Image: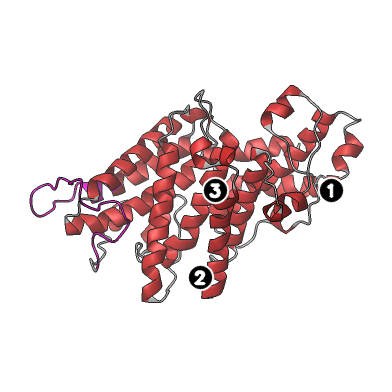
Amino acid sequence: MVQARILYTIVLLAENALGEARIVPDSAIESALKLGLHRRDFAEKHASGLTTLEESMRRTWYELYVTDGCIATLQRKGLFKTNAVNAEVLLPCEELVYESGMCFMPVTLEDFHNSVFAEEEKVFSSFCYRIEAVRLVGRVLTITGGHGAEKELVQAVDNAPAAFIHHLPRSKSEPEVVNTFGELDELMFQAHTFIHYSTILLHFSRGDLISPDPVMQNVPGSNFTKLLCPYSRRYMHSIKAIEASKSLSILAALRAPVHKHSPFFMYPLALAATVQLSVGAIHAKSSSGCLEQHSDRVKLILGVLKSLGRHWSAADTVLRTLKKAASAVFRSPRNGPSHTVGQDEVVDSGMDTCPDVPIDNEWLHNFDV
């Protein structure tokens, strides 16, 4: 029943039934905790010695953890329930090992977190890195409230996703998400998506790219409270949000079957597009050569959402919303002739090509869901 409710929650989100999607996970979590699914010995006790079944039970808990984290992110909750549980479940193995039914020795969370201090590098399963990425999203959520957070705390939380990327084994790095045979590691794809998503969640509201206008609530996955930061810091927050949105667009550009991605992917995509639209609105006023690049990224994201929309109605809703905003930004009349970018021109370094340009958020007022 826990497994069924997890799948049902994902489908509800994908079909834009957000109200019910907020309720079903609670019943799944309640059932899981009542069963003791979060305890280390649960799988061993109930799998009758079948290692594959033990692994399935462990994966059920962690899939519930990931789903709960995604729901909490969309709702901007400061805490998600499974993250507050003192879980002792051993970590899942690699997909190929699981599918083959071979024997394997699962590791603990402590083993995983202590590995960064080990003399020799140890490679864990993609599932492990995906779990850690969701945990880092959870850390960001704890400081996304309307009152912001102390500079040192924000910096500490910002360090965690950066450290995650640096400590990844080469085989799990972003360029290796697709192997030489063109096969996508979907779990690492999701892990990298969550990391970039967490970076935007942390920095977008603290930068100077967005308006506190309530119309922003209509961009799915982009409902932010504007946080006031010292002026000198807003610039760097904006740069980090822009870079993360660019990284998400690179993931979106991978030539992998779009329908195999998790429906959750549409929400980080929506947020990445919102960042590109925000900075695009600035560059449109400055006749910057960057504008075409922002437009291309938004077109890519709209295309991926269009493909996802053939399977999930929520993607179509996101697509229609962003199309209206994109039309307002990129079809706006601009002074002067069209600008062609030269090879010696710096055009892709975030905000540095158009300093001191006031943000025109007029495009935000002209669309809704």
Which image quadrant is residue 235 in? bottom left
Q: Nearer the viewer, residue 335 or 341?
A: 341
Query: Can you say whether 153 is above or below 39 in the image?
Result: below
Main secondary-structure element of the magenta-colored stretch: loop
Residue neighbourhood size for the residue with mark 3, other residues' Cα within 10 Å, grouped as few (<14), some (14–19), many (≥20): many
The numbered mark at residue 39 is: 1
Residue 148 placement (x, y as % from top left):
51, 72
Q: Is residue 12 magenta?
A: no
Dot 2 corresponds to which residue?
Answer: 146
Q: Dot 3 corresponds to which residue? A: 194
Q: What range is drawn magenta here?
A: 326-355
Which amino acid, by three-letter code, is at mark 2?
Gly
Is residue 139 left or right of 214 when viewed as pictured? right
Residue 297 seen from this side: yes
Q: Secondary structure at mark 2?
A: loop
Tell me: 364 left or right of 189.
left
